[in-house]
Amino acid sequence: MPRHERVSLSVIRRLPRYYRFLGDLVKNGVTRISSRELSLRMGLTASQIRQDLNCFGGFGQQGYGYNTSLLREKIGAILGIDSGNPTIIIGAGNIGRAIALNMDFSNMGFNLIGIFDISKEIIGTEIRGLEILDIAELESFCEENHPRVAVLTLPREAAPQVVERLVKLGIEGFWNFSHYDFSVKYPNVVIENVHLGDSLMTLSYLVKNNDKKENS
Amino acid sequence: MPRHERVSLSVIRRLPRYYRFLGDLVKNGVTRISSRELSLRMGLTASQIRQDLNCFGGFGQQGYGYNTSLLREKIGAILGIDSGNPTIIIGAGNIGRAIALNMDFSNMGFNLIGIFDISKEIIGTEIRGLEILDIAELESFCEENHPRVAVLTLPREAAPQVVERLVKLGIEGFWNFSHYDFSVKYPNVVIENVHLGDSLMTLSYLVKNNDKKENS
DNA sequence: TAGATTGTTAATCGATTAACAATC
DNA sequence: TAGATTGTTAATCGATTAACAATC
C-alpha cells in the first residue's frame, strides 16, 4: 500500500497521534481541517503533516484541506486497527492486569484470547472474563488457537525462557513490558518495547536539565 | 556538564539502555568492554556509542575500552538517578497502582511521597505504605511538601483540570499515562508521555507490514 | 614496543522544513 | 474567478556512520 518503498518508523510513530487528534476533532464536530491548523494544535509543522500523509496517498483536497472523519478512517486502516490479531498476555501481575483491564485491544488491531501466569494462586481466576491459564499449557493453547501477538508483562528473569517458547510457537509480534531486551537475539520478530524504566530515567534527566523555565 | 552545547533527545533516550546493559555486564562480572563489543550486544554501531558517550566526556581509555562499573556510574549520574525528586501519583486505578507497586522510583531519580484519587472508596487505603489521599487535598499537600514531579494515571476526561492545578502548584515534570496531550498548551514544563495506545497501534502496523520474516 | 581502542573530525545518510506549481 | 491549500520537489538541517590520528 505505501506509495514510497519504505515508510520510516518516525512517520509510523506519528500516525497514532494523528489518529488521536483527528478523533477529538470529529468528536467536537469539526469536519474539515487544513494541515496548517492541525500543525498548530499538534505542535509540529504543516509541511511534516503533508509529507507524512503523502507517504500513503493523497487524502486531502487542494484549497479545502482534509476531511477529518475520512482522514481518521484512512489512518486507522493504515494502522490496521481492525486486524483483530489473536493476542495473549503473559504474566497477570499488576502490570498485566492493568493492561488487560485498561487497553481497548479490539479497537487497536488486537483480539485478546488468553492470559497466562505461573502462580497457582491466581490460575483459574478471571480478568475481564478471561480465565487465567497455567503457563504450562502455553504450547497446547497456541497449537489450538494460533495467537500472533504476545504481551510480555512478566518478570525479567522469566522472560528469556518464555520468549524462546513463544518464538518457537510462531508468535510474530511482541508488546514487551519486561526489561528483557531480545531484539538482537530474535531479529525476525516484531518487537515494540515499552521500557517504563527507561522512560522514567529520561524524565529524570529532563527535569534535572530543564532549561525551559528560564527561556520563557 | 554537557561538553557540547545541547545534547539531542535521541542521545538522551539511549542512555537508560546503556545503563541497563552495563548493569547486566557488571552483574555478570565483566569489568571492561570495548565500544565494538558493546555495539554487538546492543545492536547498534560502535561509532554511535563513542559519539554518544563523548557528548558528556571521555569515559574510556585508548587501547583498553571502558570500565563497565565506572561507565555505569557516570551514566547514572548524568541521568540524575539519585536526584530524589519529590513525586506524586495522580490516580490510583489499575495503572496507577501497578506503577506505584512496580517502579523502582528511588533508584531512578524520584521519591514517591503521595498518591491521590477522587474515589471515596479507595481514599484512605494504602499502596506501598502510602495512604491514598483525596484529590481535594492536592493544594494543601503541595504547599506543604513541594513535589516537583507528577505521574498522571487518571482518566483523560479528568486530566485537563488536574494538570492546570498541578502546573499552578509548580510541578515541573510530568510522567503522563493519560491520553491527554498538553505539550502545546504548557510549553514550559517537562513532559514524558507514555501513550500506551499509540505504542499498541504502532505494533499493529508493524505486525501487519512485517517484512522481516521473508528476508531471512 | 606493538596492538588495540578511544576521541574526534569528516562524509554520508535520512528526516525535516521551505517553497511553489498544481488544482480544487 | 480568486483564494486557499494541497502534493511534491528542492534545500536545509541533524543524526548516524566511517575514518583515522592520538594514545594507552
Image (cartoon, coloured by chain):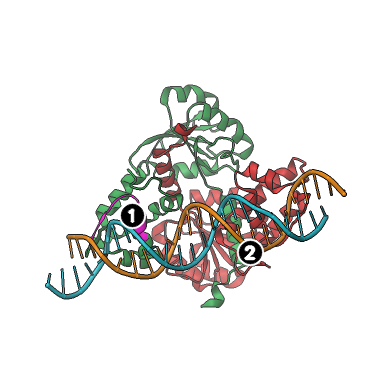
Chain colours: A green, B red, C orange, D cyan
Q: Which residue is mark 1?
A: A53
x, y (%) of residue B213?
46, 33
Location of mark 2 (residue): B85
* Amino acid beneath label 2: Asn
Q: Is A107 placed left or right of A215 in the picture?
A: left
Q: Is residue A55 magenta?
A: yes
Q: Is residue A214 visible?
A: yes
Q: Quarter of the image containing the N terminus of chain B? A: bottom right
SS class of the residue under badge 1?
Answer: helix
Query: Can residue A172 be seen at all in this image of the molecule?
Result: no
Residue at 43 percent of width and 42 percent of height: B206
SS class of the residue under badge 2? strand
Q: Position of residue A110 (x, y in %)?
A: 39, 39
Other residues around mark 2 within 10 Å, as few (<14) / some (14–19) / many (≥20): many
Choose between B111 and A73: the one closer to the eye: A73
Image x and y of residue B137, in percent:
52, 67
Specify start and end residues of the magenta stretch as a single range.
A49-61
Dot 1 alpha-carbon crowd within 10 angstroms: few under 14, some 14 to 19, many 20 or more = some
Q: Quadrant of residue A117?
A: top right
Q: For the residues carrying marks 2 and 1, which lies nearer the camera in this image?
A: 1
Residue located at (37% from left, 55% from top): A52
